Amino acid sequence: MHTTKAAAFSALASLAATLLSSPAVQLKHYGQPRSVCTKETATKRTEWSSLSTAERKQYISAVECLMAKESRYPSGEIPASDNYYTDFAAHHAEIALYVHISGSFLSFHREFIQLMEHSLHDCGYPSDMGLPYWNWPAYLDAPLNQSTLFDGSPSSLGRDGESVRWQGNYVISAAEAPMVSPIFEKGHIIPPGSGGGCVVEGPFANTTLYLGPFPADLTLTGLPDDWTEKNPHCFTRNLNDAVLRLLNNADRIENLLAAPNITNFQSQLNAIHRGGHVTVGGPMMDFFVSPLDPTFFLHHGQIDRLWTMWQAQDPATRRYAYNGTNTYMNQPDAPEVTNSTTIDFGVLGEKVTLGEVADPMAGRYCYQYV
């Protein structure tokens, strides 16, 4: 049974109030401030293709290690999350309607991928290496299924899904339109990708997923009551080079970095962000459980990288610049976010304020993009 739109937004407002009023606590492990954070001591986050073959394999091995660990959710709470890795997707689903197209989008995802980076280090990924990122414009000269990301080799993230004939065009729905505005509007047609079926080659092939899939229309109503129950299905992809060329090209990145204020930056970022998700397809297109595909963390590494670059152009005015509320599409009557706005990371971590996650090279963080 699905919740009503009114009930969904009532619950959203209630949780937002809780998040805003909860006191922040110090993360006991990685989040303790470092005594010294310099370019020399900072963890280095590197573009995927710039990693050596051995380094890419180390990353894949660490992700597989997380997939082999038990879930952190109490027994029976979210049966569909059956391991440590999918807990990230489960929490993302729980909080998705607060941290997308909202004032906390950038801050939430910065801490979210940091928690993944820390988890990878606990699984043997070298402590001086950060989460890799996916610099989209560097992948426009050749098909994605030939790239180091998706060529299906042992040092890739696996291949495209099996080709599905006659899958048809993808039509932008009313629910998805806000995510790709102003580039696409409701009814816009996107050519089909090259896959669409199960991933059967390379790392993460033949994986059975239990969370989702959830249609985009649920952004208007909230998840169904039984969303936590297991729904076994294969891991799919549907690579779409045309979308990447249109939404994630160098000109769009240049314009984004030239944004005069945070409002304009966020507005331009919407379609760029969604572009990466649609480019990969499969669970990456799922608004709620997109972290099921390991590509998610490289995609959001790039988004955090661009926000970091934009902040660094004028730290005095941009470091703590926010726009919007703690609700999806900034619902009426919700308070504007501030430095003291708190986000709860549940089983993944702890509560942090937006102010605590504003600087990658201070406080709880010490990382840089290279």
Image: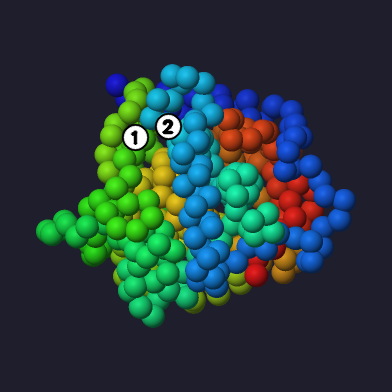
Give residue 278's position: percent from left, percent from top. 36, 57
Image quarter of the C terminus: bottom right
For residue 81, which numbered disc appears in the image?
2
Q: How is the image coloured?
A: rainbow
Q: Secondary structure at mark 2?
A: loop
Q: The disc labelled 2 sits on which kind of residue?
A: Ser
Give residue 132's position: percent from left, percent from top. 56, 61
| Residue at (63, 30) in percent of width and height | 19
| Residue at (54, 58) in percent of width and height | 58
In the picture, measured across the screen, residue 299 lies left or right of residue 44, that is left
Q: Residue furthest left?
A: 166
Q: Secondary structure at mark 1?
A: loop
Q: The disc labelled 1 sits on which kind of residue?
A: Tyr
| Residue at (46, 34) in percent of width and height | 83
Vertical comparison of 241 with 291: above or below: below
Q: Earlier in the sequence, mark 2 or mark 1?
A: 2
Q: Out of 210 and 11, give the one closest to the viewer.
A: 210
Image quarter of the N terminus: top left
Work out whether residue 264 can be spotted. Answer: no
Quarter-wise, where is residue 229 in the image? top left
Vertical comparison of 175 with 279: above or below: above
Give residue 110's position: percent from left, percent from top. 62, 50
Q: Out of 250 and 63, give the one closest to the viewer.
A: 63
The answer to the question of whether label 2 and label 1 lie on touching residues, with beta carbons closer than 8 A, is: yes
Work out whether residue 325 can be spotted. Answer: yes
In the picture, measured across the screen, residue 262 lies left or right of residue 66, that is right
How far is the residue under mark 2 from the one under mark 1?
A: 7 Å
